[in-house]
Image: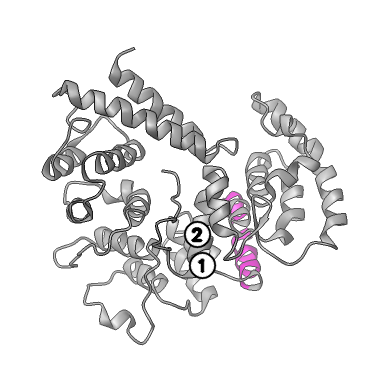
């Protein structure tokens, strides 16, 4: 197997890891280290057929990222982070310049990159990324606002929308609203998400995890009126972390069309606590048909067990079976699967309203 094949195999393995509850941070770290080792070897060979993998300077990285057609957006995000670490690890100004150039690019299809790129850029811990709204598309402006949200930056409403000298489409206005310190009229805002068909977006996940249980329950009830949003409701119940949704999810796991999504939501909230009701081996059975049958069978046991536990369960949010609070959130991110990490990151924004910039800050796997 040549170097390119080895590199691509590691990228493929990373895809599987990022969606797995059985993967731990150490697995991602090992994968990253292996990718870095092979990338260095590829750069030593200087194969012109792979310009993105051989990019060195800021201009080369930007140009190769814009024009590469071999790698999918997810893989290109990983490669970009590797290149920045390899060539500009201790040069935030250079990193910032590359991010700025990519934010301003007229070649990149922002729709394919926005959430992943905004998340990656937010974790570079750059002091400042300059951005002007002049001559930018609405999609570019929205991507930058999402970057600001992920960085924990917020606007006070008094400073707010009118202080931003940009042209505003309905969708851009929604992004700006989510940039406010306090969200006004969340039920009305949910209606805007629906009107814009934006309930499957990364921005909607920021919105949902920012809400308290009472408002969230109302929104889930409204979403449930739309059959096309049933699986999204189940998924976001897991994102919310509220243990009160466990009985609903246990019953949903009995429905064949909802079994796997309900399991993922339950595993998101309960983590290893789910093992007490559903044997671990059946949760991750390779044969999907058998796995669904076992999950449906054990859902009744889970429902019974939870009815007994609910009386003792405090009204808290859980991720991976751990109460989500300011003390625990970094530990959850440091010690949980990539699935839990991404959701915990959203809760960290809610808890702190800013992403910590300390050297100990942990990153979400990309």
Q: Which residue is mark 1?
A: 350
| Nearer-the-camera pick, 306 or 99 | 99
- Secondary element type, mark 2: helix
Q: Is residue 4 left or right of residue 304?
A: left
Q: Position of residue 363 (x, y in %)?
A: 43, 50
Q: Is residue 197 visible?
A: no
Residue contact at pointers 1 and 2, CB within 8 angstroms: yes
Q: Position of residue 140 (x, y in %)?
A: 25, 58
Above or below, comparing residue 320 to residue 245 in the picture: above
Which secondary structure dominates the residues rendered in magenta?
helix
Among all residues in the image, which is located at the extreme top? 1
Among all residues in the image, which is located at the extreme bottom? 158
Above or below, comparing residue 206 to residue 270 in the picture: below
- Magenta stretch: residue 219 in it? yes
Label 1: how many residues lie within 10 Å, few (<14), some (14-19) or many (20+)? some
Label 1, label 2: how far apart the Cα atoms are: 7 Å
Label 2: how many residues lie within 10 Å, few (<14), some (14-19) or many (20+)? many
- Magenta stretch: residue 122 in it? no
Q: Residue at x 35, y 66 (%)?
A: 171
Above or below, comparing residue 275 to residue 134 in the picture: above
Q: Which residue is mark 2?
A: 346
* Quarter where residue 247 is shown: bottom right
The stretch of residues the image draws in magenta is 215-233
């Amino acid at each position: 197997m040549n170097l390119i094949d080895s590199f691509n195999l590691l990228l493929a393995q990373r895809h599987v890891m990022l969606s797995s509850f059985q993967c731990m941070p150490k697995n991602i770290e090992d994968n990253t280290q292996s990718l870095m080792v092979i990338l260095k070897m590829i750069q030593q060979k200087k194969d012109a057929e792979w310009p993105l993998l051989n990019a060195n300077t800021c201009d080369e990285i930007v140009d190769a990222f814009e024009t590469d057609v071999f790698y999918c957006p997810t893989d290109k995000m990983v490669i970009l982070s590797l290149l920045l670490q390899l060539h500009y690890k201790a040069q935030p100004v250079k990193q910032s310049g590359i991010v700025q150039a990519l934010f301003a690019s007229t070649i990149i299809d922002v729709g394919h990159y926005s959430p992943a790129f905004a998340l990656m850029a937010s974790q570079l811990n750059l002091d400042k990324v300059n951005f002007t709204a002049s001559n930018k598309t609405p999609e570019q402006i929205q991507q930058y606002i999402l970057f600001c949200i992920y960085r924990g930056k917020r606007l006070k409403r008094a400073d707010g929308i009118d202080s931003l000298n940009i042209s505003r489409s309905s969708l851009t206005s929604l992004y700006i609203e989510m940039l406010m310190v306090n969200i006004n009229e969340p039920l009305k805002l949910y209606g805007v998400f629906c009107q814009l068909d934006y309930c499957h977006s990364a921005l909607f996940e920021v919105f949902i995890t920012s809400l308290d249980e009472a408002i969230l329950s109302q929104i889930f009830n409204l979403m449930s009126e739309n059959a096309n949003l049933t699986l999204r409701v189940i998924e976001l119940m897991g994102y919310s972390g509220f243990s009160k949704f466990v009985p609903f999810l246990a019953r949903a796991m009995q429905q064949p069309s909802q079994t796997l999504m309900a399991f993922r939501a339950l595993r998101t909230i309960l983590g290893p606590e789910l093992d007490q009701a559903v044997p671990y081996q059946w949760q991750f059975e390779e044969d999907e048909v058998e796995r669904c049958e076992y999950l449906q069978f054990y859902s009744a046991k889970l429902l019974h067990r939870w009815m007994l536990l609910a009386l003792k369960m405090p009204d808290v949010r859980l991720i991976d079976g751990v109460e989500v609070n300011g003390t625990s959130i970094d530990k959850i991110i440091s010690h949980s699967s990539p699935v839990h990490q991404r959701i915990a990151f959203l809760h960290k924004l809610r808890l702190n309203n800013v992403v910590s910039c300390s050297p100990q800050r942990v990153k979400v796997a990309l």
